[in-house]
Image (cartoon, helix red, strand yellow):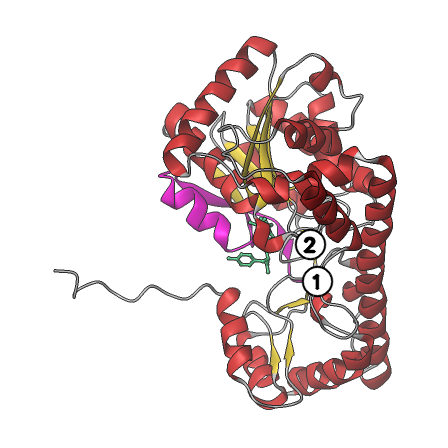
């Protein structure tokens, strides 16, 4: 009966890791998936995470189910981290927060909510965007369309196109926005452009849905990286925000995150929360306890919180260093070409502009693994390998 099931396409990002594993060359370098590596190219478990885990073992906590909406201390910590502890919406109890399965699961619960309570509403995604956004909305039965975002000519934001598309979207559309460190382009709106975006969302009664996967990881500052959702909230706009602790706390496989709704009054927040719980119940019943305790422990303890910020700045700083080194190597070996876009992009990635054919050359000839759209994860690059990468990029753009 099931023999006619067709093969599903592999994930365009995680599939790259599989190809990398199969390569036996000593030269190989995995710049596909956005996962932090040390200078030795090893995964990193933060010290504060290990400390929190030791504390948890000392407390001898049990493994009972969490409530459907998640761990109370985590929910308090996560929303305060996102919006700032003195935020008016928090004080006024106008926020509905559910702990969910990292960024992806939080986005999916949000998409299910849109499908259920705003039927017929289209979600607008940036072109390009993180590949999973399309699947998440489509699988939840929410139609999606693109808005213009990236201008390959300037390797920057096509703000005019973005404004035009979002203005022309039907009134009350969902607009998915990357909170900071846009994946895959590394190109973010300026503060003034965010302001214009907020004006436009008010004018058109759109519902912004922020995807915050890199808070603290882009600039090294948790506050700076939360500027956009905080600004929209301050303008009194109803917003949705998905949060992930995969990158900033390195909790990738623990699946820790949250979905937050900032609403206009407390009563609406209570009702929205009840519906989010109803959705989560049928999807996974209740979220994982281990990672939520780590976040609550780290954010709730002032010493550990400071230590986390230092470790996060260490990661963000190492990425900035290799970004600079890659740029400098390229400038040295290929000075006729303008490589300054690499320094303008922020966050974990660089969007190199390499064509699919050039990417093939990078992989087949130089054993450098990256996604076909030309994105490289600088978090997977070491200072020691920056020169090798630059030579391979130079060779690829000449061919
Ligand atoms: N959204 C964006 C833009 C991402 O880059 C990622 C990947 O880290 C996620 C969401 C969600 O990742 P996770 O489900 O691991 O939190
Ligand atoms: O864009 C990335 O590389 C990260 C990690 O299905 C990721 O966001 C990639 C693909 C995926 C889940 C996470």
Is the CB atom of the residue marked by disc 1 within 8 angstroms of ligand 2's nearest atom?
no
Q: Name the one closer to the observer, 126 or 3.
A: 3
Residue 217: tell me if it is visible.
no
Q: Is residue 299 magenta?
A: no
Q: Quadrant of residue 6?
A: bottom left
Image position of 200 with respect to 252: above or below: above
Q: Does residue 38 appear to the left or right of 136 in the view shown?
A: right
Could you say where residue 203 lies in the image, as x and y percent from the top left?
A: 61, 22
Could you say where residue 143 lies in the image, as x and y percent from the top left?
A: 39, 40
Q: Does residue 46 appear to the left or right of 271 in the view shown?
A: right
Crowd around label 1: few <14 · some 14–19 · many ≥20 (10 Å) = many
C-alpha distance separating marks 1 and 2? 8 Å
Q: Which residues are magenta?
A: 126-153
Q: Quadrant of residue 61?
A: top right
Mark 2 = which residue? 250
Q: Circle 1 sits in a helix, a strand or a loop, which is it?
A: loop
Mark 1 = which residue? 36
């Amino acid at each position: 009966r099931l023999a006619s099931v067709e093969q599903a396409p592999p994930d365009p990002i995680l599939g790259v890791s599989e190809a990398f594993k199969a390569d036996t060359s000593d030269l190989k370098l995995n710049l596909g998936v956005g996962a932090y590596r040390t200078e030795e190219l090893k995964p990193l478990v933060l010290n504060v995470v290990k400390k929190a885990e030791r504390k948890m073992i000392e407390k001898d906590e049990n493994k009972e189910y969490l409530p459907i909406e998640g761990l109370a201390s985590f929910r308090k910590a996560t929303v305060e981290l996102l919006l700032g502890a003195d935020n008016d919406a928090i004080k006024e109890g106008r926020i509905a927060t559910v702990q969910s399965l990292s960024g992806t699961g939080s986005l999916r619960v949000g998409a299910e909510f849109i499908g259920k309570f705003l039927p017929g509403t289209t979600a607008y995604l940036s072109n390009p965007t993180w590949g999973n956004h399309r699947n998440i909305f489509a699988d939840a039965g929410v139609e999606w369309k693109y808005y213009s975002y990236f201008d390959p000519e300037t390797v920057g934001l096509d703000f005019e196109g973005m404004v035009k598309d979002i203005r022309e979207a039907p009134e009350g559309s969902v607009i998915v926005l990357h909170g900071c460190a846009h994946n895959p382009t590394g190109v973010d709106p300026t503060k003034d452009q965010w302001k214009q975006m907020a004006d436009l969302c008010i004018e058109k009664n759109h519902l912004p849905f922020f995807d915050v996967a890199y808070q603290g990881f882009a600039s090294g500052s948790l506050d700076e990286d939360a500027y956009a959702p905080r600004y929209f909230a301050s303008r009194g706009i109803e917003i949705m925000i998905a949060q992930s602790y995969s990158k900033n706390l390195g909790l990738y496989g623990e699946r820790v995150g949250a979905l937050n709704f900032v609403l206009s009054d407390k009563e609406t927040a209570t009702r929205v929360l009840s519906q989010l719980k109803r959705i989560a119940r049928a999807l996974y019943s209740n979220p994982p306890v281990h990672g939520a305790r780590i976040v609550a422990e780290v954010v709730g303890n002032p010493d550990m919180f400071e230590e986390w910020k230092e470790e996060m700045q260490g990661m963000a700083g190492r990425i900035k260093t290799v970004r600079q080194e890659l740029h400098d190597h390229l400038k040295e070996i290929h000075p006729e070409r303008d490589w300054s876009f690499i320094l303008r992009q922020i966050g974990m990635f660089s969007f190199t502009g390499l064509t699919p054919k050039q990417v093939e050359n990078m992989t087949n000839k130089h054993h450098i693994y990256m996604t076909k759209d030309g994105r490289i994860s600088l978090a997977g690059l070491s200072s020691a390998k920056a020169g090798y990468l630059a030579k391979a990029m130079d060779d690829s753009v000449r061919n």
